[in-house]
Amino acid sequence: MDFQLTEEQEMLRKMVRDFAKNEVEPSAAERDEEERFDRSIFDKMAELGLTGIPWPEEYGGIGADFVSYVIAVEELSRVCASTGVTLSAHLSLASWPIYKYGNEEQKKTFLHRLATGEALGAYALSEPGSGSDAAGMKTVAKKDGDDYILNGNKVWITNGGVADLYLVFAMTNPEARHKGISAFIVEKGTDGFTFGKKEKKLGIRSSPTTELIFENCRVPKENMLGAEGDGFKIAMTTLDGGRNGIAAQALGIAQGALDAATDYAKEREQFGKPIAANQGISFKLADMATEVEASRLLTYQAAWLESEGKPYGKASAMSKLFAGDAAMRITVEAVQVFGGYGYTKDYPVERYMRDAKITQIYEGTNEIQRLVIGRMLTK
Ligand code: CAA
Ligand code: FAD
């Protein structure tokens, strides 16, 4: 067993850490307050090659592995979870399925645009009436000559409105339930494709979450990913890896909260000594650090399994479940270490706490992760 990162992975971590500190952190609180997405941050990530980390160079990527990818999401989320999920949704939800299921033409066009950061991606599975029960979707795609006509609504779409390419799941055969779902790549600006409500959220407030509306939206059949009826398999296998991106986001949030709480505990004095000198505080920090490390091991392991071509679905559900729950516990404790100051926007820990909550909800709630793991154990 080798727990040592490679020289390339270490270099990538240093590069992303520097970028996060200098280009992302300074505006994180302000973007959160203003609920403002900043495309220039994504463009700078593209310049660094982060928008195509695991894809081969011929498709515009930098040919690194999935461990490098989770390290990047971790380091971004350590200062700004919204930026972490922008990259995670773009890379593991919008780009991965095109890499995995796309034909050569789709990879040379759509994947290349996503990998180079020319285009930002989004993944549209959830609907008002179907979140956990993803196969219960109502959006339909009806064949019409060489095109499909899409009608329906998607909700909660990360990067919605600001993304250029959307992977949209729709029923081509509603009677067949999950076997009747197909996947389409839909470009922003396509006639009949508009944006609805932008959510006002508790956390990850500089990551836009938006409704998509399809009204007789004509999509050419060349934009179908895989074959008719492949959509649910594409959606589920995409989430297998995507969930580890959320684990990395949770890990980054938790590490950021732990760092802030540790520094504060050493500086803040009460009763004539630093609060860290109280076992009540240092034990909290010890528990937080231990959970951060366990989250990291699970997350890196799942990424390593994917890079090695080994099964990683269960490992990824476990990393998301553990790291998401741990991030919530750790960020609550971080606010506690800061006392009253932690409850204000003068320090970043209240933002970490608000951001951590979403990691227990999206890409399958943590109840759904338990369902997935349970089914894998008992099937
Ligand atoms: N890989 C391959 N195939 C899979 C699979 C997987 N991981 N999971 C299920 N399948 C297949 C099954 O083998 C089965 O195939 P057959 O019919 O050929 O046997 C078929 O799919 C149906 O499987 P189930 O009966 O298990 O399906 P289900 O309707 O009970 O649902 C579920 C399973 C796991 C609960 C699924 O609905 C699910 O994952 N729900 C959560 C939805 C979700 O995670 N949404 C995230 C949206 S993206 C997001 O949130 C973005 C963001 O954060 C930024
Ligand atoms: P529901 O499915 O209604 O669940 C409600 C509660 O019931 C939850 O606690 C759930 O765990 C529980 N529950 C449901 N079924 C079961 C069961 N069988 N056993 C035990 N408990 C159960 N979706 C996308 O497609 N693309 C995106 O980019 C995207 N980004 C998102 C960003 C944000 C900020 C948010 C909030 C959501 C996003 N989503 C996205 C949607 C997200 O994946 C769903 O919110 C999530 O899957 C849960 O669905 P739901 O909200 O409909 O809750």
Image (spheres, rainbow, N blue to C red):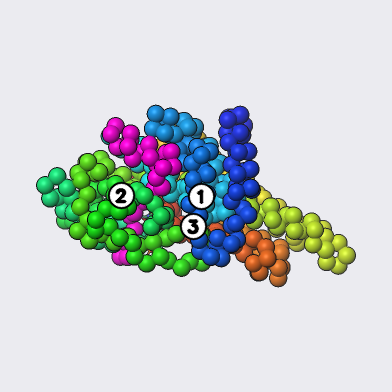
Task: Indicate which disc, 3 or 2, sits on the residue closer to the N terminus.
Answer: 3
Residue at 18 percent across and 50 percent down: it is 148
**In the rendered structure, which amino acid carries the disc numbered 3?**
Phe
Q: Say whether marks 3 and 2 touch (CB < 8 Å).
A: no
Q: Which residue is mark 2?
A: 187
Residue 172 in the image, given as x and y percentages of width and height: 19, 51
Q: Judge the density around disc 2: few (<14), some (14-19), many (≥20) Cα neighbours within 10 Å.
A: some
Q: Which residue is mark 3?
A: 37
Tag on residue 90? Answer: none
Q: Is residue 207 placed above or below 4 in the rendered structure?
A: below
Residue at 73 percent across and 54 percent down: it is 262
Secondary structure of the residue carrying tag 1 is helix
* Label 1 near ligand 1 (CB < 8 Å): no
Residue 113 in the image, given as x and y percentages of width and height: 38, 40
Residue 162 in the image, given as x and y percentages of width and height: 41, 55
**In the rendered structure, which amino acid carries the disc numbered 1?**
Ser
Give the distance between the C-alpha atoms of the residues marked 1 and 2, in whole angstroms.
Answer: 20 Å
Q: Is residue 303 visible?
A: no
Q: In this view of the protein, which residue sits in the foreground, 217 or 152?
A: 217
**In the rendered structure, which amino acid carries the disc numbered 2?**
Glu
Residue projecting furthest to the left:
145
Tag on residue 40? Answer: 1
Q: Which stretch is magenta?
A: 104-130
Q: Is residue 126 magenta?
A: yes
Q: Is residue 39 magenta?
A: no
Secondary structure of the residue carrying tag 3 is loop
Secondary structure of the residue carrying tag 2 is strand
Residue 375 in the image, given as x and y percentages of width and height: 37, 49
